Image (tube, rainbow, N blue to C red):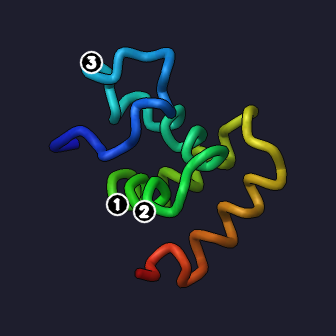
Amino acid sequence: MQKKPNIPPHFLWEYDVENFNWERSYKIVIERIIERGWLNDWKEIYKIYGPEKILETVEWSKQLSERDRRFTRIFLKSHLLHAA
């Protein structure tokens, strides 16, 4: 990963975001955005991590609800993520 993603620090309130390893800890970031993120946050994780890592996290996570899992699978296939 070249640069720090444009993810608001309040999503990772318990971490030192200046020294946060965005690549190694991608599952934490993705989970938080799925649960609490706005469209711009979704666009950022899609741009930085791609659909494969997002779906991998959805399958791996014990924290995400089934509702969040289903929403993510549908949302990634929709045109809404790429809308203006």
Q: Residue at x 49, y 37 (%)?
A: 29
Residue identifier under label 1: 47
* Residue 30 image point, x, y percent: 52, 43
Q: Quadrant of the C terminus?
A: bottom left
Q: Which of 35 and 65 lies nearest the eye of the viewer?
A: 35
Amino acid type at circle 1 is Lys
* Residue 24 image point, x, y percent: 38, 29
Residue identifier under label 3: 19
* Label 2 residue SS: helix
| Sequence-first tag of 3 and 1 | 3
Mark 2 neighbour density, 10 Å: few (under 14) some (14–19) many (20 or more):
some
Q: Are marks 2 and 1 in contact (CB under 8 Å)?
A: yes
Q: CA distance from mark 2 to mark 3?
A: 23 Å
Amino acid type at circle 3 is Asn
* Residue 8 image point, x, y percent: 40, 39
Q: Which of 51 and 81 lies nearest the eye of the viewer?
A: 81
In the picture, the disc for residue 43 is 2
Q: CA distance from mark 3 to mark 1?
A: 21 Å
